[in-house]
Image (cartoon, rainbow, N blue to C red):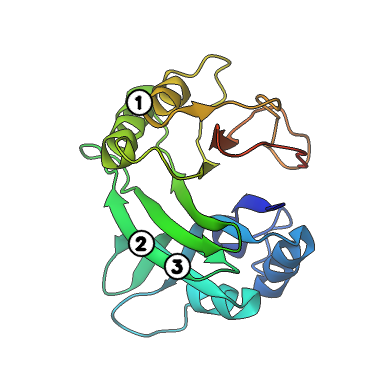
Amino acid sequence: MPITVATFNIHDAVGTDGVRDIARIARAIEETSADVVALQEVSGPGGVKGTRPDLFAVLSRSFGGYAVEGAALLDPERRYGNLLLSKWPVIDQRVADLTYGSREPRTAIVATLASPAGPLRIIASHFGLKLGERWRQAGTIGGLVGTERALPTIVLGDFNDWLPFSPAVRRLCRALDLLPGPFKRVPTFPSRLPLLALDRILTNGLIIPRTLEV
């Protein structure tokens, strides 16, 4: 059964023109026709409701289906982090803390979806900026689900990693039996003239990648 997935760092819905436009982000997501979408740098109001728009809620409603919120930063004024959108029901979900030391808080969403072809595991994350930080975050994800290898698995998100032989990617692939696939290190950043492959989609051997678009 064909499955379409997408990963998108929405930068708090602020485009390259410096304008925050939630409707534009929603249209871009819709244009992918994806069954599963991993979003990074999503924000919303925290415990105290204010004027900040709730991108988690707005984008979830716009997409339809099901959503898993994975906020990494949560305080009275703001919550901020990852959002997983799915056309299919969520069987199981958890949000893993990937924060390393005093670095910016990070999380990974680990969810099992009830796809028409059967259970599908999705791991969506936004890795850190430092090489050692990313290496440890890959190890944490591997430790969480490394013993559960029977499920078709897709790991996707903003890896913040452009290295051709990334230690973090290699560690993640070893832990989860993932495959780099036929489409390796496709540049995605900056969006105007992509030079660096910051965003990645990895699968295990139970999924066969067919096409890739940026």
Q: Nearer the viewer, residue 157 or 88?
A: 88
Residue 82 in sight: no
Q: Residue at left 68%, top 53%?
A: 3
Whether 156 is drawn above or below 21: the answer is: above
Q: Residue at the location (34% across, 47% down)?
A: 106
What residue occupies the far left of the structure in this picture?
A: 101
Q: Residues within 10 Å of mark 1 (few under 14, many from 20)?
A: some
Give the labeled residue for mark 3: 90
Label 3, label 1: how many angstroms apart (C-alpha)?
28 Å
Could you say where residue 71 lies in the image, as x and y percent from the top left?
36, 62
Rendered residue at 45%/26% (across/down): 173
Pick whichever, 164 or 129, lies toward us.
Answer: 164
Label 3: element kind: strand
Disc 3 to disc 2, C-alpha distance: 7 Å
Q: CA distance from mark 1 to mark 2?
A: 23 Å
Under mark 3, the amino acid is Val
Amino acid on which the number 1 mark rests in the picture: Trp
Pointer 2: what residue?
A: 93
Neighbor class of circle 2 (other Cα within 10 Å; few <14, some 14-19, many 20+) is some
Q: Is residue 192 visible?
A: yes
Residue 98 image offset from top left, x and y in percent: 29, 43
Q: Amino acid at mark 2?
A: Gln
User: Do callouts 3 and 1 mark residues in contact (Cβ within 8 Å)?
Assistant: no
Left or right, 124 with reference to 73 = right
Dot 1 corresponds to which residue? Answer: 135
The image's mark for residue 66 is none
Q: Secondary structure at mark 1?
A: helix
Image vertical order of residue 82 relative to residue 128, above or below = below
Which is more N-terminal, label 1 or label 3? 3
Element on which disc 2 rests? strand
Tell me the residue at 35%/25% (across/down).
Answer: 135
